[in-house]
Image (cartoon, rainbow, N blue to C red):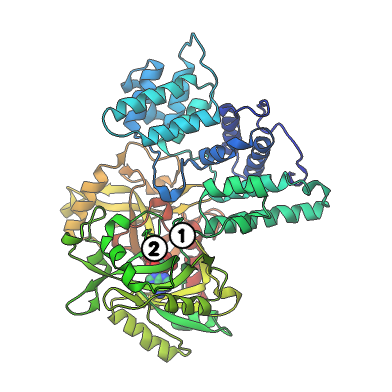
C-alpha cells in the first residue's frame, strides 16, 4: 500500500503546515502501532505519519524520531531519560489529586504506570484546559528533565512532569509516562523506525511519482538499505535526519560518513563448533586466523566500549600512551581493538577477570593497579578516509603502517595465515595458553572481507576452546526471576529464571531455570544485588508460561553468561518461540552459570534468533 502513498491524513489528526506537530498525532500513531503485531502494518502506520510530518512540519521530524525511539540524544551520549518509578508515582499523585498509596495500588493491579496515569486523569475534573501539547514542547521538556541534576532536582523534575501531565488529553498521559520511564514498549523496533525514515524520505523525492510501480517498490527497498547502512557507520540521527531532509536518500552516503568521535558499533563474529566447520565456511577464500583477546573493546582518543559507552575516564593511561604508538603521518583514526590486562613483570597477558577489577570512572594514573595493553586488529578510518569498504588485507596493511608496537602497551593482534586443521589447532592451543579466548577466522580479500559495523557477520568466525565440546557459544541471558532457596540455600535465592531478548517484539522470553555454577559467596552477592530489583508483578514484556513461574520477579537489570550442554524444544519455555516450532520455545539443558556480563545491557543479551541458530547448529555436524 505504501508504494503509492502520495499525501495523507496519517494520524487522523491534522495540523496546519508550518505549525508544530501535535503530541496527540504521535500518540494516535503509537496507539495504532500498539494495536497490531504485524510488522508491515506497523511500518505502514509509521511511514505514513513521517510523510505527514515531512509535508507539514519537517523541522519536527528529528524530535518525532527520538520520541519513537524513546531517546533524547544519540546513544553514545549516554544521557538517560529513565525517571524512577517512585518519582513518577509522586508526580502522578500530585497532578491528579490522588494519594500515592492509591497510585501504587493501581500499579500493582495493572503493571503499567502509563495506564494508571491515564485512568487517574480521566476521573479528575479539569476546570481550565491548558493548551494542547506539541512534539517540540514534550521533547524539550523531556530533555530538560534528563538534564536536571543537583540541588532540588527531584522537585524540579516533579514540577516539569506535572506540567506535562496536566496538559495531557486522552491517551497522551499513558504514552508520556511510559516514555518518561524509558519503557515505551509498543513493539516498535529501531530497525522499523530506520526503514520508515528511509521510506518517507524516498516517497517525498520529486522523481518518485514518475516511476513505475515495480520501480517504486525497488526504490523503497533500496532507500531502506542505504539508510540502515549509513546509520551503522554514523549512528547519530542528529546528523542523518537533517542531511536526509536536505539531500534525500541518494545524497546521504556522500554527505554522511564514518567520523572520528562518533562511535560505531563493532563487527561481531559468528560462532563455530570446530575448526573443520570454520574451514568449511571459508572454503575457496583467502583467510587469516587471529588470536581472540579477552578484555574490553574500545575506539580512539575517546575510548568507547562496545555498548558505545564513553570509557575514556577509565583508561587515562591508554590515552596518555597514544602519542608514542601513533606514527607521525597518522593524523586521525578509528581503531577496533581490545584492551587486555597485562602483567609487566612476567610480560604476559592476564585473564579478563583481572581487568574487571579496575575502577570504572575517574581513574587516576597514580592509583592504577592493573596495567593494560592495547591489541589492535582493525583500522576503520585513517586521515580523513573511511576504510570500511576496503578489503581486510588492505586495512591490515594500513594498520601496520599507521602505528608501532611497544611491548606491554600496544601490539597488533597475533595472526597466522594457516590453512590446515593441524596448524590451526596448534595456533588455537597457543592462543589459549596466552590467556586468549580462542581464534577469530576472517576472510582476507574481496567483498566479503569488508568491515560490517554492528553486524554479527559470517565473514568473521570465532573458534573458542570450549566450543569444541558442547554447544558452540555461551549465551548471555537476563535474570528475570528467582525461586526461594531450600536446604543450604534458605537465606538466598536458590535457582533463577533466565530469558533471552527478542528485539523485534521488545520482549524477554524465558529460556531455563539455573541453579548450577554458583559458589555460596556468589549466591549471597546475587541475593544482595537482585533483592533491590524485585518487582511485585512480571513486566508486561516478559513472555513466560505459568509452568515456569518464579517465586519472585526482577526488573531486567543484569546479564549472565551461561554455558549449556545442549538446547531442546520445550513446551514451557518461550525462547525463539515460533522460530523452530510454531507453538513451542527452546530451552537449555544443564545450564551452568559462568559470570556476570557487566559490559552488556539487558537488550544486548543473546537474541531469540541467535538461540534458534544455536539450536539448529547442534545438528549441522552430526
Ligand atoms: P563475547 O562474549 O566473546 O564477547 P560476543 O558474541 O559478544 O562474544 P564476539 O562476536 O564473539 O562477541 O566477538 C567480538 C568481541 O571480540 C569484540 O569485543 C572484540 O573486541 C573482541 N576481539 C578480541 N580479539 C579480536 C580479534 N582479533 N578480532 C576481532 N574481535 C576481537
Query: x, y percentage for residue 602?
Result: 39, 51
Q: Secondary structure at mark 2?
A: loop
Find disc 1 in the rendering and name its residue: 260
Describe residue 424's horizontal placement relative to residue 560 as left or right: right
Find disc 2 in the rendering and name its residue: 300
Category of crowding for the residue at label 1, using alpha-carbon neighbours closer than 10 angstroms: few (below 14), some (14–19), many (at least 20): many
30 or 617, which lies in front?
30
273 or 600, which lies in front?
600
Query: x, y percentage for residue 324?
Result: 31, 72
Describe residue 437's horizontal placement relative to residue 573 as left or right: left
Query: x, y percentage for residue 393?
Result: 51, 80
Which residue is most to the front?
Answer: 328
Q: Residue sitting at 46 percent across and 28 percent down? A: 115
If the picture is divided into quarters, which one holds ligand 1?
A: bottom left
Category of crowding for the residue at label 2, using alpha-carbon neighbours closer than 10 angstroms: few (below 14), some (14–19), many (at least 20): some
**Discs 2, 1 touching: Cβ within 8 Å:** yes
Image vertical order of residue 303 relative to residue 556, above or below: below
Residue 155, quarter of the rendered image: top left
541 or 213, which lies in front?
213
Amino acid at each position: 500500500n505504501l508504494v503509492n502513498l502520495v499525501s495523507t491524513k496519517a494520524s487522523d489528526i491534522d495540523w496546519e503546515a508550518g505549525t508544530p506537530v501535535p503530541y496527540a498525532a504521535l500518540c494516535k500513531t503509537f496507539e495504532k502501532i500498539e494495536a497490531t503485531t504485524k510488522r508491515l502494518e506497523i511500518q505502514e502506520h509509521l511511514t505514513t505519519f513521517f510523510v505527514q510530518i515531512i509535508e507539514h512540519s519537517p523541522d519536527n521530524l528529528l524530535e518525532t524520531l527520538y520520541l519513537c525511539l524513546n531517546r533524547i540524544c544519540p546513544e553514545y551520549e549516554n544521557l538517560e531519560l529513565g525517571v524512577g518509578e517512585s518519582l513518577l508515582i509522586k508526580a502522578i499523585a500530585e497532578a491528579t489529586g490522588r494519594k500515592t498509596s492509591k497510585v501504587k495500588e493501581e500499579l500493582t493491579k495493572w503493571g503499567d504506570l502509563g495506564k494508571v496515569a491515564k485512568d487517574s486523569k480521566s476521573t479528575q475534573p479539569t476546570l481550565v484546559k491548558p493548551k494542547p501539547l506539541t512534539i517540540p514542547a514534550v521533547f524539550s521538556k523531556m530533555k530538560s528533565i534528563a538534564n536536571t541534576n543537583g540541588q532540588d532536582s527531584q522537585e524540579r523534575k516533579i514540577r516539569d512532569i506535572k506540567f506535562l501531565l496536566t496538559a495531557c488529553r486522552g491517551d497522551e498521559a499513558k504514552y508520556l509516562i511510559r516514555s518518561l520511564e524509558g519503557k515505551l514498549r509498543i513493539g516498535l523496533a529501531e530497525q522499523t523506525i530506520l526503514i520508515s525514515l528511509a521510506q518517507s524520505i524516498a516517497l517525498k523525492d520529486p522523481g518518485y511519482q514518475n516511476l513505475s510501480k515495480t520501480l517504486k517498490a525497488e526504490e523503497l527497498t533500496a532507500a531502506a538499505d542505504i539508510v540502515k547502512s549509513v546509520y551503522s557507520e554514523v549512528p547519530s540521527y542528529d546528523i542523518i535526519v537533517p542531511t536526509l531532509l536536505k539531500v534525500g536518500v541518494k545524497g546521504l552516503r556522500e554527505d554522511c560518513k564514518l567520523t572520528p568521535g562518533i562511535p560505531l558499533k563493532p563487527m561481531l563474529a559468528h560462532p563455530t563448533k570446530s575448526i573443520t566447520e570454520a574451514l568449511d565456511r571459508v572454503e575457496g577464500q583467502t583467510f587469516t586466523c587471529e588470536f581472540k583477546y579477552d578484555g574490553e573493546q574500545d575506539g580512539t582518543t575517546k575510548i568507547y566500549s562496545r555498548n558505545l559507552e564513553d570509557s575514556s575516564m577509565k583508561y587515562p593511561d591508554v590515552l596518555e600512551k597514544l602519542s608514542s604508538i601513533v606514527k607521525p603521518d597518522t593524523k586521525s583514526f578509528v581503531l577496533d581493538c581490545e584492551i587486555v590486562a597485562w602483567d609487566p613483570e612476567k610480560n604476559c597477558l592476564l585473564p579478563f577477570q583481572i581487568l574487571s577489577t579496575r575502577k570504572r570512572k575517574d581513574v587516576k594514573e597514580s592509583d592504577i593497579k592493573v596495567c593494560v595493553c592495547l591489541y589492535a586488529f582493525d583500522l576503520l578510518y585513517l586521515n580523513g578516509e573511511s576504510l570500511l569498504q576496503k578489503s581486510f588485507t588492505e586495512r591490515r596493511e594500513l594498520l601496520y603502517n599507521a602505528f608501532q608496537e611497544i611491548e606491554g602497551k600496544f601490539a597488533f593482534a597475533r595472526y597466522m595465515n594457516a590453512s590446515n586443521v593441524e596448524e590451526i589447532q596448534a595456533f588455537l592451543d597457543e592462543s589459549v595458553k596466552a590467556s586468549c579466548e580462542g581464534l577469530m577466522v576472517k576472510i582476507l580479500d574481496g567483498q566479503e572481507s569488508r568491515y560490517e559495523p554492528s553486524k554479527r557477520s559470517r565473514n568473521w568466525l570465532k573458534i573458542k576452546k570450549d566450543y569444541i565440546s558442547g554447544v558452540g557459544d555461551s549465551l548471555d541471558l537476563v535474570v528475570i526471576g528467582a525461586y526461594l532457596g531450600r536446604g543450604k540455600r534458605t537465606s538466598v535465592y536458590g535457582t533463577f529464571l533466565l530469558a533471552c531478548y527478542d528485539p523485534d517484539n521488545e520482549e524477554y522470553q524465558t529460556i531455563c531455570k539455573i541453579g548450577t555454577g554458583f559458589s555460596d559467596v556468589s549466591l549471597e552477592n546475587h541475593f544482595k544485588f537482585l533483592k533491590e530489583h524485585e518487582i511485585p508483578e512480571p513486566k508486561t514484556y516478559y513472555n513466560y508460561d505459568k509452568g515456569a513461574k518464579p517465586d519472585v520477579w526482577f526488573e531486567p537489570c543484569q546479564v549472565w553468561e551461561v554455558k549449556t550442554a545442549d538446547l531442546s524444544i520445550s513446551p514451557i519455555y518461550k525462547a525463539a518461540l515460533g522460530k523452530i516450532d510454531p507453538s513451542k520455545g527452546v530451552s537449555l539443558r544443564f545450564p551452568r552459570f559462568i559470570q556476570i556480563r557487566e559490559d552488556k545491557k539487558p537488550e544486548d543479551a543473546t537474541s531469540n534468533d541467535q538461540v534458534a541458530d544455536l539450536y539448529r547448529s547442534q545438528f549441522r555436524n552430526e
